[in-house]
Amino acid sequence: MKWGFLPKDTGKPVYLAVNSDESEPATFKDRYILVRDPHMLIEGIIICSYAIGSHDTYIYIRGEYTTQVKVLQAAIDEAYDAGYLGDKVAGHDFKLNVTVHRGAGAYVCGEETALLESIEGKKGQPRSKPPFPAVAGLYDSPTIINNVQSIASLPFIIENGADAYRKYGTEKSPGTHLFGISGHVEKPGMYELPLGLPLLEVIDKVAGGVWKGRKLKGIIPGGSSTPVLTPEEAKTVTLDYESMAEHKTMFGSGGIVVLDETVDMVKLVQNLIYFYHHESCGQCTPCREGLGWMLKIINKIVAGKGRLSDVELLRELCDNIEMKTVCVLSAACTMPVRSYLDKFRHEFEACVAGENGSKQETEQEER
Amino acid sequence: MAETIKLFVNGCEVEVEAGKNLIDAIGAVGIEIPHLCYHPALGADGNCRMCLVGIEDGRPPLVPACKTQAVEGMKVLLDAEHIKKIQKDVLELELINHPTDCPICDQAGECSLQDYYMTYGREESRMNVDQVKKAKKLDFGCGVVHDQERCVVCGRCVRFCRQITKTGELGIVNRTDSARVTIFPGRPLDNRYALNVVDLCPVGAMTSADFRFKQRVWFLKKNRSICHGCSRGCNITVDHNREKDSDDMIYRFRPLLNEQVNGYFMCDEGRLSYHGENENRLSEARLSKTPLSFDDAVTAALREIEKHDDILFLLSPNSTLEQMMAIRSFAEKIDATLSGFSDGYIKKGDGDDYLIQDDKSANRAGLELLGIDSSKEAFETALKKADLLLNFNNDLLLAYSETELKKLLKDTRVIGLSSHETACFQQANLLLPVASFTEYGGSIINCDSILQFFAKAVSKNSEPVEICELISLLGGPFHDRTQLWEELKKNCELLSNVDPDNIPPAGLKLTDSEADNVPA
């Protein structure tokens, strides 16, 4: 865990920042925790704060989560009233204050250092690392940043022991995870599952399979920034970190999107680039300028004015931009885009050849 | 020299100064790492991504050189194909939305983007979609004009206003390729160092309303000098050009790095003081307002000096040590009284805790060092007694009103040696034009007792005579530099160990302690 990186005895306060700026498209696990069981999160915060010696917690919450903010704040107020937060936590000589900080709608603020900048009242732009937040984070003090789900899993582990948690999942990916399954399935929803289950089995048995009896075209395994899996690849994928890495994609946020045969991959890529371009903070040159360029190229391709060279340029730009920036936002765009360009190349070629998905479009309209 | 370390660049061992980042450390031995956002005075930001280099020691494959400390034994990769490709790629991305209209851009010729393109890019443009349109010709105040389309959003200007002037007028608004540098509505730049953002800007996004479109920079000749705007003595580059059929004119002053005097910057007032070197110059000698030849004026001055017994010499606190010595020894020879009265040059409360000083003269410390009396009482007493005043370019109207001065001078005859057409010399009986500071060289001592030497920067068509030279024409005993320095050493303890021909470019701190003066 990140906690081990905390320097000791710096004389500075230690902060805990809980990342609930859940903005990754297709991801909706934290909102469930925030609304259904905010007390579990608060309990986790108390455990974590006690462990790292922190007396101030900031919950950075996505600004659009208005209901979640209300529920969470009410739960925090309850915890203060019940004496679980405040000057004497549960009667012990331990002080803990929890502050909810609402974001203003920037995806990049889910990046941990941009999140800190935003709490500090600055423009949400990622910092370069090192120094890492554990050493110099919020207000230049040691800071631990964890996701809502990670913090919320603490009470179970503390109560039942690590072995009880390890009972679920695989050796390297222990425990359970919340999977938000959306897209073209019969039963979309939020499912808590142990790690390591076969992906296709989960889609078929848990989410009811691809809807309307259609054929599977692809699966986004963990939020929009993870490279897409073809049905062929998906056969051997299990829902854990190692298997995803073996298949050159990522576990990501657990937001699984099922794409059926009607999906126009060219338009999907357009949508993807539009989102990441819009959310680029504008700090680093490659991301700031490059994603805008990519968007214009894909727009041109979708408009039927593209050439094969434009598809090639788009593919090359993915390589030129990726990993050249302070944070991974650019990679969050280029990695999936590259996967679509490589795995569904024929669709882009068809699009520039003038046979753009008109057939599919009519199909969709009929629907 | 500071502690050094050895590291490897492209496999070759180089010895560099310890404690610096890779750009500065390796740059100091002549190996360039391209960068736009990093500036040594502003620190690393890491947003341009031009300086990504490879380090072969297991750390992440790419690191920004601006944020990476040079350490012993480090293996830096600069010329590997993948690094060169990154430089090329980032450059391409910098350029896609940049209006490549260099021929009409004021920065052309001193633009990092242009230089880097020639060194690292040289690729055909692949940009075949519309460029991002942004605002142009924005008046940011303080004479700074901004072009958002040319901007590479490196943020140097923003960081300057936050870190150096601490005024924070500039910010970057919007995200993605709509990000742009701007001022807050109705809150333009409002600090006395604002024009430094023009120098800091690596591209043509920040231009000076005063300088833009006046000259192409490659025509400008560049000479070092020292600003005479105040006693700080900021080191400057004098950019000047003699256009066909006209005189050599100065087009701008730019700050020149001197860590112990002014760092990388200078104030706007000093920067724009070049206008004074071009304009309102005294071009002819005059006897009772009637022009006469310089030679005749010298003869007339000689006659005046011979005719009068009680002569008062008034020095300017802007004179060089050499000029002061020449004037002092001349005064001693003809038994004239000497005054350095120049209270008018001090603007109480005008200075700040950064560069600007209250004292608007360049060498008051020199007056003190040479023991020249600068008190008002002594000057006024001497003036009452004197029947001839020789004023060496000291603008008395800074200290007195016109009527006060008239009353004070009564019927004392005045010989003015002036570089400018100042009202102070309107009534002078005899007026001789002399050179101004960009037209001669000499030594001055700044507010921190740092002795600095500056050389002549500009040669005018009709070379105005320098004061030391004029003194020798009027019968002064010493005029050449070697002689004057021998006298200076004899007369000033502090200067006794100074080698006038080897004053370091960064200046020499004059202290009572010998140890401090051993050149590093």
Image (cartoon, rainbow, N blue to C red):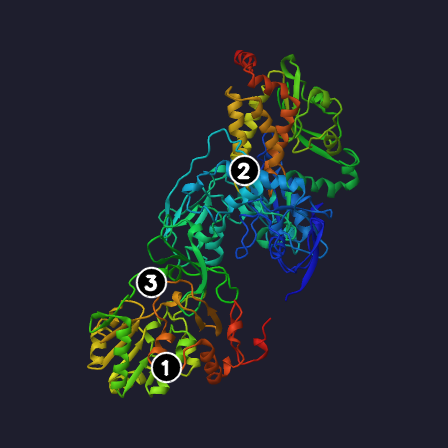
Residue B331 percent across, percent down from the top left:
35, 84
Residue B276 numbered mark, or none: 3
Distance (Cα) linking label 2 and label 1:
66 Å
Q: On the image, numbered disc 2 is attached to which residue?
A: B93
Residue flagged by tag 1: what amino acid is it?
Gly
Quick check: B352 left or right of A87? left
Residue flagged by tag 3: what amino acid is it?
Gly
Residue A190 numbered mark, or none: none
Which one is in front, B516 or B246? B246
| On screen, residue A310 above or below B474 | above
Q: On the image, numbered disc 1 is attached to which residue?
A: B476
Between marks 1 and 3 in the image, the one whose residue lies nearer the viewer: 1
Which residue is depicted at the point 57% across and 35% down?
A23
Chain of the residue on which disc 3 is drawn? B
Which one is in front, B485 or B422? B485
Question: In terms of secondary structure, where does tag 3 sit?
Answer: helix
Q: If the image is split into quadrants, where does the C terminus of chain B sit?
A: bottom right
Q: If the image is split into quadrants, where does the N terminus of chain B sit?
A: bottom right
